[in-house]
Amino acid sequence: MQSERMKKLRVVLVKPGKYAIDGAVERFGHGFMPNASLYHIASLTPKSLRGTAIEVLTVDEYVRSNLDYLDLLAADASQPVLLALVGVQSHQFHRALDLAAFARSRGVKHCVIGGPHAMTCDTTQMQGRGVSFALGEAEVVWHEILSDAIDGELKDVYSPGMRWQKSLDGAVVEPPSPDELERYVLPMLGLYPVRGCPYRCNYCSVVKIAGHPVRSAAIETTMESLRRAKAGGVRYIAFVSDNFNKYPQATELLEAMIEADLGLRFFCQCDTHVVNQPELFDLLRRAGCFEMFIGVESFNRATLKAANKFHNYPEKYARLAALCRDNGIRAHFSNIIGFAEDTPDSILGGLEILKSLNPPVASFYVLTPIPGTEQYDDFMAAGVITERNLDRFDTTCSVWRHPTMSGEKLEQMLYHCYVDYYRHLMQQRDRHDEFPEFTIFCRYIASQGIHPMAGGTSRLTLDRVEDYLPLRRRTYGFEYADLPTSLGLSEEDRVFNKSSDWRRPAVPA
Ligand code: B12
């Protein structure tokens, strides 16, 4: 009887897709991996709050093959609905705005947008129009938002003065259901055991989103997430943290994973400094690491220095590839093309060096001044940003005036790099690749001018930007948002951000 009288709140968490260059909402028959933001925030949501039962529904728009889920973005007579657009990147921002406007038009009273874009860019232009913006981490503001939804009114803006939780509470992440996992190529779960990056690469927004101090939750929190993942049918883990090797407790976690012997294979990202931590490779291998993503970015030290990426030494890349190979870990070398110093010849030269190093996975991106970064501010001040539509800031398009290369040439070079590199890999007779289909996929999809890392396979078109533009105009008063200015840090966040020393946890436990 008690529970029948309990008040209820339905929370719909949506990872928005984006508008592709042809205007279609980008969707895939299968995604590469479930979105980490969705399950992280779902796990931060209590089952009840202040006597109100909370129901959580999750939607990854990228892998929805029909539009039925849009029915969830509607008022429900039996309970209030809170729509939260999560993990919204700059190139997904218009789509997030449209989904919020759509939900508002169908009576949903509470809509909030959070994630990298809202945390790092000024959203004043959109504020006060019925959609709220979260400028801080979910750990800082999510409970306040839930509480306000229960009370009946959201604020326009959450956490304007505090971007980061100083000491992370952490959340044991519940994996996607087996039905949800079916939507992806691999039964994978993304976990974020540690965040923060001590470096200052001028093109990267990680330091703006996660800050410099390296923060992590308790090892046991990650271990419990791993155990639940295993029990839920997950076989692969993606540690989405940016520099796993800068995690002060990496060894401790890896040893706990070896001890637990759950049989999960995992992917992690490391910075190139990992070359100086050879002992970590053996531990990674024994704990189940199958792939290491490394931002090598360029083979030219002067280019790297100009981008403030002082910690990358191209002469050490061969050793890095060898360390991975010797430990049975697929090295994934990520490359940026279109730095100001790059020319077609230098890009092709880099490609040849890459082939000689022969990492089993390589990805290529066009240098993009991501809103919120130092580079974006510099390029804005210099007046060299040519693209006005945020949808295009997805690192597959040229959005600024390169000093020597046309945008067309750069985009052509991007797909050339993919096709040529994966052709090179396919030609190797003695390849013992764990995922041979991936190599073929990259080669094939790039030859069609589609970026292999867009998020999935078998693109589907169900709806297009034109279907949503009239509502966008009515709700926000524009067709395309102005390019934003970057958001500065509050004094408190600035002081905290300066306290960084990656060798120690940000705030001692
Ligand atoms: C994993 C990852 C990917 C994966 C995503 C796989 C998947 N299915 O999820 C892959 C490899 C596909 C990918 C691709 C791209 N990515 Co990416 N990616 C990341 C990475 C490393 C981690 C993201 C993550 O999962 N975090 C874990 C979750 C829990 O954190 P979160 O989403 O940030 O959420 C926290 C806060 O943002 C906030 N929050 C988020 N949502 C909400 C909502 C509410 C209501 C509230 C209150 C708070 C809140 O609270 C959360 C918990 O603290 C980040 C770097 C980083 N450290 O953020 C880059 C990052 C998000 N990617 C970025 C970019 C640019 C891309 C690409 C466009 C190009 C590229 N070069 O990689 C492509 C785009 C592909 C696509 N179609 O989206 C940028 C985005 C910058 C921006 N402002 O837009 C980042 C920040 C990296 C960078 N160097 O700048 N990426």
Image: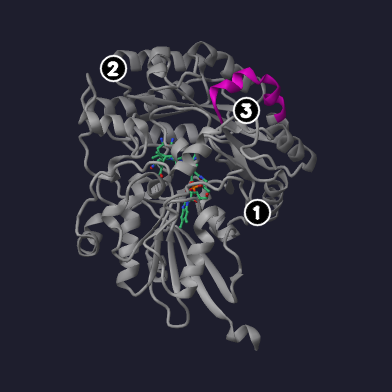
Sequence-first disc among 3 and 1: 1
- The residue identified by callout 1 is 172
- Dot 2 and dot 3 residues touching (CB under 8 Å): no
Give the distance between the C-alpha atoms of the residues marked 3 and 1, in whole angstroms. Answer: 27 Å
* Tag 2 and tag 1, C-beta contact below 8 Å: no
188 lies above or below 318: below
Q: Which residue is mark 3?
A: 329
Q: Is residue 185 left or right of residue 411?
A: right
Where residue 29 sits in the image (x, y, percent)? Answer: 43, 52
Q: Residue at x 60, y 30 (%)?
A: 502
Q: Local crowd at mark 2 within 10 Å, few (<14), some, or many (≥20)?
A: some
Q: What is the three-letter code of the residue carrying label 3?
A: Ile
Residue 11 lies left or right of residue 406; in this view the side is right
Callout 3–callout 1 Cβ contact below 8 Å: no
Query: Residue 362 placed where, x, y %?
Result: 47, 27
Q: Evaluate whether residue 302 shows in this view.
A: yes
Q: The C terminus lies in which quarter of the figure? A: top right
**In x, y percent, where is residue 80?**
45, 76
Give the mark nearest the N terminus, 2 or 3.
3
Q: Earlier in the sequence, mark 2 or mark 1?
A: 1
Please, what secondary structure does the residue beneath circle 3 have? loop
- What are the residue bounds of the magenta stretch? 270-283
